[in-house]
Amino acid sequence: MRLSDDTHDTAATRRTELSEALDSKARGARAPRKILRDDVRRLVEGGAQLVEVLPRAHYDKHHLAGAISIPLGELNRGSAARLQRDRAVVVYCYDALCDLGSRAAWQLAHLGFEQVYHYVPGKADWFAAGLPGEGSEADLPRVGSLARPDVPTCLPNERIADVRRRVHDAGWDVCVVTDEARIVLGLLRQEQLASGGDIVAEEIMDLAPGTSRIDMTIEAMAEHMRTKGVHRAWITTPDGALVGMLHRGDVEQYLASADRVKQEEHQVSLGLGDRARSKLNRRAGTVDAVDEDDRGRKYGLRYDEQPQDKHNPLPGHDGAQLPPELIEPE
């Protein structure tokens, strides 16, 4: 007699549950539960404790908001005393291929914690979904912040003629084919949108267009676009849902603006005068109009009151010297 697929699936599920139960009994601890991103959010809202078990250097760079650091190598009865036993504990590491999270979850179970959860996909999944983090690299600009969410979309069964009209009216030349949940299914480029008749999107769309993660840094994306000659990128969540379209021009403009800000901050840190700052800004393509009487006012002197050796630092330079091209002519 041939068993149905449902029967096979049920039997496999029961074998897995039995195996986990036997493992739990053999280990003398209550088995930790494996959970996903939405479960983490629900548990945290209910007061669960978040624990990252990667080495502390990884935690310091970027970790889930509100998480504490207990590296697996330091997880013992003493360090576990930081956790409250009457509250759920969610442990995580980097991703689903990292075994530190599973080992830490079982370690806590052996230490007597009864509400232990293992966030299997880890923080790679969390940040790829654009969820909040903390740490020294948490504020690095990422592509999700520049993606244009208003890129046109259509369903796979929509007529190309209708899609073309809507895309044209919106001022675009491309359309992303998605389902009702915005899961990316395909892409209609300009040449496909020009098709006539009663063709529907799924018949001519490009299948499986390349996508990029929402947590990719803008600098990394800029390098990728320059190297590959890419002018557009489709940004999605780990679930495949469309976040938006990222244009290379937006990336380059953002980086240019960020460079100017850094340059100005550096000038201020060196204590450069306003005229020198204006020269640097003009070189960077900006204009910094400063009233003549205000030049050097920060230091209580004008440029014509500088020491005779004009390579000497301005007051407050702490030994820094003006570049020769910024020295004012006699």
Image: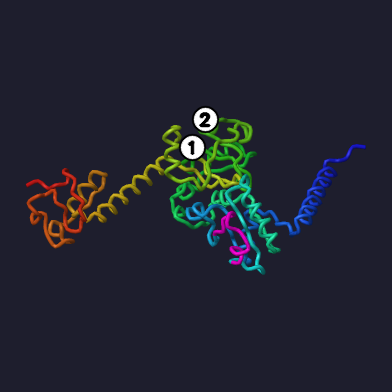
| Percent position of residue 285, x then y | 26, 44
Q: Which residue is mark 2?
A: 191
Q: Residues within 10 Å of mark 2 (few under 14, many from 20)?
A: few
Q: Amino acid at mark 1?
A: Asp
Seen in the picture, residue 318 relative to 219 is either above or below; the reply is below
| Percent position of residue 280, x then y | 23, 47
Q: Which residue is mark 1?
A: 173
Q: Tell me if residue 34 is in the magenta stretch.
A: no
* Magenta residues (range): 69-81
Residue at the right extreme of this rendering: 1
Q: Secondary structure at mark 2?
A: helix
Question: In the drawing, does residue 28 fall left or right of residue 252?
Answer: right
**Residue at the spot 84% in from the left edge and 46% down from the top edge:** 11
Residue nearest the viewer, comparing 262 with 156 = 262
Residue nearest the viewer, comparing 242 with 309 = 309
Q: Amino acid at mark 2?
A: Glu
**Residue at the spot 66% in from the left edge and 60% down from the top edge:** 108
Question: In the drawing, does residue 274 fall left or right of residue 142?
Answer: left
Question: Disc 2 and disc 1: Cα gap in Å?
Answer: 9 Å
| Percent position of residue 143, x then y | 47, 46
- Residue 106 is marked as none
Seen in the picture, residue 116 relative to 200 is either above or below; the reply is below
Mark 2 and mark 1 lie on one chain; the one further toward the N terminus is 1
Q: Secondary structure at mark 1?
A: loop
Residue nearest the viewer, comparing 33 with 281 = 33
